[in-house]
């Protein structure tokens, strides 16, 4: 039986406060592989009559090549352009009329599509996903329509927003010629403008196949019923022969690298600091994640309180992991207050990191971070839809959806010495990239024209 998460949450928080190990999560997980290679994850939860259905394809922007960026993201748009049986954008309206919601997203590491629906709409959601896996309308007008939409999206959401360009530039600086994570998910503008329609069908046939996907169903359903429905709608689809998601080796450049970016839309100075760290869910990911939680999560977090509330050096401070399957980054993002610049505020941040490398964090501070992280984790998977996407991700990335049940144990096992060692190992100046973002200089002041001499009196 799926536990009542509020009770689990309370027990977990009490366990963390007492310094005990986390209570194991009693999440039922069944996994199956259809003959065509489709991986299926089912988790029954009969508390509410709803379902989460998520399908993750093992293709993201990290598999793209120079000159062909943005295709994974554009194809997410194409998946809502209609099929032989569903009209353009009708996927949304069909799910909404059934009382649910649907959407999709693309990242470096995978592309996902999902539906949250009432219990009686399971077969509808499965049929919609199977239908567009097989009969997607890949016409040239649809392609051109969505290519222009993505170009407009980039212009509105990135190129014309303050600071957004710096989030692309910091990845370029951090990864250099390591192309999988150096280029933007949305694609380079020149690549989008030159994107050939002929690549569409090949991309679809290569990556949107059962052998390249994980399908998760969570919520108020019997596992045998869910599996039978999945087999009915997906079982006859040809397996396909997708390439494996393999990332090349990466060696971070030695030494600190710095750059200054003039952002014509930025009202205040800001900066990124990005440190190279191992892939997400490596052993050191957990102490680094807890460190970020303790430092900046909430207005009482010590780094936020010091830089924002007490010294007034910054108006925004955030930190965390990118959570990449491959080489990851631990980053700080800071927007300065008027009258302060990046080097000044960064010196205060470096004081914090130097002290943490020497002394670590107090036991009580680590317990607080574990409490917050545990509460956020449990609150997230309270939703059947979020649970479905997380289970599918664990199956796709690490080969076992049931690993999700052990995550709180991994956080609970972190010690203050683990945090101190992680700071010493990774948060070093010779292991980071710094990007200062500055507003444009003010325009020069034009001199006042000389006054005309007064006319002589008559």
Image (cartoon, rainbow, N blue to C red):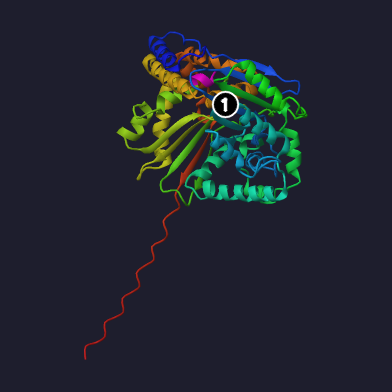
Q: Is residue 219 above or below residue 132?
A: above
Q: Which residues are magenta?
A: 283-287
> Observer-nearest residue: 253 or 277?
277
> Observer-nearest residue: 408 or 103?
103
Q: Residue furthest bottom?
A: 458
Q: Is residue 132 above or below residue 28?
A: below
* Residue at 56%, 47% in the rendered image: 153
Residue 380's spot in the image, x, y percent?
48, 24
**Horizontal placement of 91 versus 341: left or right?**
right
Q: Is residue 17 above or below residue 87?
A: above
Q: Can the viewer see residue 432?
A: yes
Residue 318 lies in quadrant: top left
> Observer-nearest residue: 100 or 354?
100
* Residue at 32%, 37% in the rendered image: 312
Label 1, secondary structure: give it: helix
Circle 1 packing at 10 Å, graded few (<14), some (14-19), many (20+), is some
* Residue at 66%, 37% in the rendered image: 179
* Residue at 42%, 44% in the rendered image: 269
Residue 207's spot in the image, x, y percent?
72, 33
Residue 286 within the segment the image draws in magenta: yes
Q: How many marks?
A: 1
**Horizontal placement of 402 versus 142: left or right?**
left
Residue 252 within the segment the image draws in magenta: no
Residue 238 lies in quadrant: top right
Q: Can the viewer see residue 361?
A: no
Q: Which residue is mark 1?
A: 120
Q: Quadrant of the C terminus?
A: bottom left
> Observer-nearest residue: 74 or 373?
74
Q: Main secondary structure of the magenta part?
A: helix
Residue 52's spot in the image, x, y percent?
56, 26
């Amino acid at each position: 039986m799926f536990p009542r998460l509020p009770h689990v949450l309370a027990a977990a928080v009490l366990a963390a406060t007492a310094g005990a190990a986390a209570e194991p999560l009693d999440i039922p997980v069944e996994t199956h592989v259809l003959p065509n290679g489709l991986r299926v994850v089912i988790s029954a939860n009969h508390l509410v009559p709803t379902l989460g259905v998520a399908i993750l394809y093992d293709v993201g922007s990290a598999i793209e090549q120079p000159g062909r960026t943005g295709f994974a993201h554009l194809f997410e748009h194409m998946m809502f352009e209609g099929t032989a049986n569903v009209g353009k954008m009708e996927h949304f309206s069909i799910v909404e009329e059934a009382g649910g919601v649907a959407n999709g997203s693309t990242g470096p590491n995978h592309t996902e599509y999902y539906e949250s629906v009432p219990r009686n709409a399971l077969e509808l959601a499965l049929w919609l996903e199977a239908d567009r896996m097989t009969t997607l309308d890949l016409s040239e007008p649809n392609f051109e329509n969505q290519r222009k939409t993505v170009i407009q999206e980039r212009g509105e959401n990135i190129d014309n927003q303050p600071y957004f360009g710096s989030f692309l530039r910091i990845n370029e600086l951090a990864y250099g010629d390591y192309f999988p994570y150096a280029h933007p998910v949305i694609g380079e503008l020149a690549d989008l403008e030159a994107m050939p329609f002929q690549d569409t069908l090949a991309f679809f046939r290569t990556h949107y196949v059962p052998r390249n996907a994980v399908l998760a169903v969570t919520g108020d359903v019997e596992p045998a019923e869910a599996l039978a429905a999945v087999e009915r709608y997906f079982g006859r689809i040809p397996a396909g022969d997708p390439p494996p998601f393999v990332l090349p080796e990466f060696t971070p450049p030695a030494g600190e690298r710095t750059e200054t970016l003039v952002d014509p839309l930025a009202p205040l100075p800001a900066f990124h600091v990005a440190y190279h760290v191992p892939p997400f869910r490596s052993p050191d990911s957990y102490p680094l994640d807890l460190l970020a939680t303790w430092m900046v999560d909430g207005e009482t977090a010590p780094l936020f309180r010091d830089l924002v509330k007490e010294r007034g050096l910054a108006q925004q401070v955030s930190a965390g992991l990118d959570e990449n399957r491959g080489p990851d980054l631990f980053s700080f993002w800071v927007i300065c207050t008027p009258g302060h610049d990046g080097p000044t505020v960064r010196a205060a941040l470096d004081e914090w990191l130097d002290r943490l490398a020497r002394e670590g964090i107090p036991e009580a501070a680590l317990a607080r971070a574990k409490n917050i992280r545990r509460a956020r984790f449990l609150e997230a998977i309270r939703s059947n839809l979020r649970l479905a996407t997380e289970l599918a991700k664990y199956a796709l990335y690490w080969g076992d959806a049931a690993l999700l049940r052990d995550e709180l144990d991994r956080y609970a096992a972190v010690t203050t010495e683990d945090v101190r060692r992680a700071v010493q190992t990774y948060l070093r100046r010779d292991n980071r990239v710094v990007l200062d973002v500055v507003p444009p200089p003010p325009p020069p002041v034009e001199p006042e024209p000389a006054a005309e001499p007064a006319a002589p009196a008559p």
